[in-house]
Image (cartoon, helix red, strand yellow):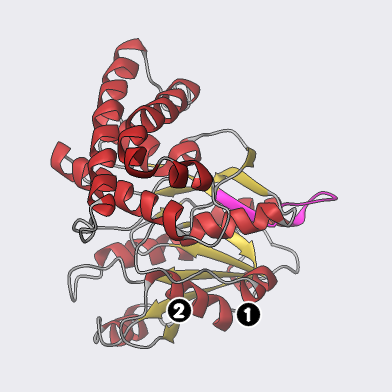
Amino acid sequence: MPQTHAIQSIDLSFVVETLNLRVAHDYTPLDTALSALSHQTADRARYEILVVVDPAKEPGLRAHLGRDWPGVRVVEVEPGTHYYAMKNAGARAACGRLVGYVDADCSPVSTWADSIVEALTSGQSPPAIAVGSYDTPRSGESWIAKAFLITIFGRHAGRTRCATSSFAASNSAVLRERMLSDPFNDHPYFHGPDVEFASRALARGDRIELVPGATSLHDHEPGFAAQHGRGLYWGYCFLRLRRESDVRVPYGALFRRLGKLAPLALIPAKTFIDLRRAFQLRRDLALNPIALAGVSGLLILNAFSVSLGAMRYEAGLPPPRQPQDHNFAR
């Protein structure tokens, strides 16, 4: 049994969406996540676990949870409810002062709850949002896994606690009162609502903090084709958000002014941002000079994929096929 440490009088509600479950009746990723949540170093009496379920999409999931996870609370939503709307529904049903978001395909480390609660409740002026770091449990030393962390999770692949300007809804926690008063926008695409949420939070003076002790393990999709597909989808959603959002998101005004040149401008912009992050995170990701060069090459290729995805949006085409899960870099 894990050692327990009380979270004093603070309650935390874990909210796990299930839209990321892609194969009907295969609940292994969710079971892995729930096992990790059930073995936190925090006192189990101080947190609850909510699983948000679309009964039309996963008709057998409630029965599975009732049989194998009796301590988990099920929140059912309307058929077709989207990823961010599932998170909003979980926040409304939660009992804790803090809402912790963990995706069905992510496994938080045992110190996640303790680290998040400490970050959001200690000190004279704690942040309103805490976001955890990411790591890849399998093939974590491969170049493509390192590039995946940088392109998909950006600065959240770091291992140093610091203020940040971005927010990942797949591995983070927010004061519940904030979520109730300012829920996620429910866009039909996946890159966007957490970017808008972070922008609104920073505009009102809230702080966002990266908490490495709240690491979440998230496997990457191996192979160049999978990473190319992610780049296509990210580029499409990136440009759509900058063109259509009514929130002042980063680079929004710039990419509206660029017009037809915006997709091409993404190549040097994304290359510069990702290469800078690779250099900044080289120690955190254990990148020696050879690995740094290899990862840099993969990041440059990804920038071209992103540009092609943005071209699809500019041309009025439908979005590319969605990757197997929906966590995207900010």
Q: Is residue 52 above or below residue 209?
A: below
> Residue 72, labelled with which disc?
2
Q: Residue at x 40, y 22 (%)?
A: 286
Residue type marked 1:
Cys
Q: Is residue 250 above or below residue 172?
A: above
Q: Which residues are magenta?
A: 121-131
Q: Residue at x 38, y 44 (%)?
A: 259
Instruction: Give the quadrant of residue 266.
Output: top left
Q: Badge 2, how many Cα within 10 Å: few under 14, some, many 20+?
A: some
Q: Residue at x 30, y 65 (%)?
A: 20
Residue 122 image position (x, y, % from top left)? 78, 52
Q: Can residue 39 be seen from the camera position used here?
A: no
Name the residue at the right extreme. Answer: 124
Q: Residue at x 21, y 61 (%)?
A: 318
Work out whether residue 20 or residue 248 is closer to the camera in this orientation and state it: 248
Residue 179 image position (x, y, % from top left)? 62, 71
Work out whether residue 13 or residue 78 is closer to the camera in this orientation and state it: 78
| N-terminal-most mark, 2 or 1 | 2
Q: Badge 1, how many Cα within 10 Å: few under 14, some, many 20+?
A: some
Instruction: Check whether the beta carbons of the residues at disc 2 and disc 1 lie within 8 A of each other.
Output: no
Work out whether residue 138 or residue 89 is closer to the camera in this orientation and state it: 89
Q: Is residue 24 above or below residue 6?
A: below
Type of secondary structure dominating the magenta stretch: loop
According to the picture, the residue beneath numbered tag 1 turns out to be 95
Instruction: Say if the magenta span includes residue 124.
Output: yes
Instruction: Give the quadrant of residue 244.
Output: bottom left
Does residue 95 appear left or right of residue 135 in this picture?
right
Q: Can residue 61 be seen from the camera position used here?
A: yes
Residue 40 image position (x, y, % from top left)? 53, 59
Instruction: Say if the magenta span includes residue 205.
Output: no
Residue type marked 2:
Val
